[in-house]
Amino acid sequence: MSSGKVLLGVLAGVAAGALIGILFAPDKGSETRKKIVEKGEDYVDGIKEKVNGLIDDLGKKMDGVKAKVDEMASAKTKTEEPKVSTN
């Protein structure tokens, strides 16, 4: 199972638990709705941070791959001998 699916499952479980906890709390409806909105915003912020981190990591890996490809391409051009014309 990929780590992305595990992370998504954990986040869904935490969100469901928090929502159930808030819904069964003995608060007024307006307070409960306010808490749900605040928790939702917190979870969205956390997910945005994780996605941004994954995008940064992917960008760094892509830069590394590009550098290796460029290095291999320049090494190949250096090893190719130019054709000499016999006029």
Image (spheres, grey):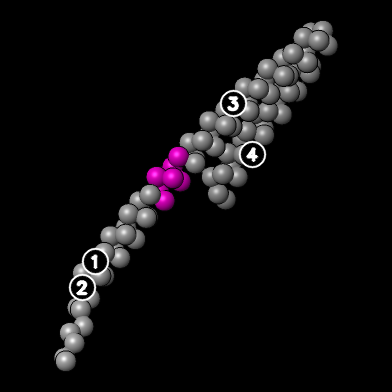
Q: Is residue 25 visible?
A: no
The residues bearing labels 2 and 4 have C-alpha atoms spaced at a distance of 51 Å
Of circles 2 and 4, the one toward us is: 2
* SS of the residue under disc 3: helix
* Three-letter residue code for mark 2: Thr
Q: Is residue 74 in sight in this rendering?
A: yes
Q: Is residue 58 magenta?
A: yes
Report the residue that reaches farthest toward the right.
Answer: 29
Mark seen at residue 9: 4
Per the image, label 1 sits on a secondary structure element best described as helix
- Give the alpha-carbon distance from disc 1 to disc 4, as whole Å: 46 Å
> Tag 4: Cα neighbours inside 10 Å, few (<14), some, or many (≥20)?
few
| Disc number for residue 75 | 1
**Left or right of 42 in this view: 36:** right
Q: Position of residue 44 (x, y in %)?
A: 63, 28
Q: Is residue 60 above or below residue 78?
A: above
Residue position marked by numbered label 2 in the rendering: 79
Q: Is the C-beta separation of discs 3 and 2 under 8 Å?
A: no
Indicate the position of residue 36 as horizontal and vertical percent values: 73, 19
Magenta segment range?
Answer: 56-62
**Secondary element type, mark 2:** helix
- Please name the residue that numbered disc 3 is placed on: 45
* Circles 2, 1 touching at the beta carbon (< 8 Å): yes
| Separation (CA) of disc 2 from disc 1 | 6 Å
Query: Is residue 51 on the magenta stretch?
Result: no
**Which residue is found at the position 24% from the left and 66% from the top?**
75
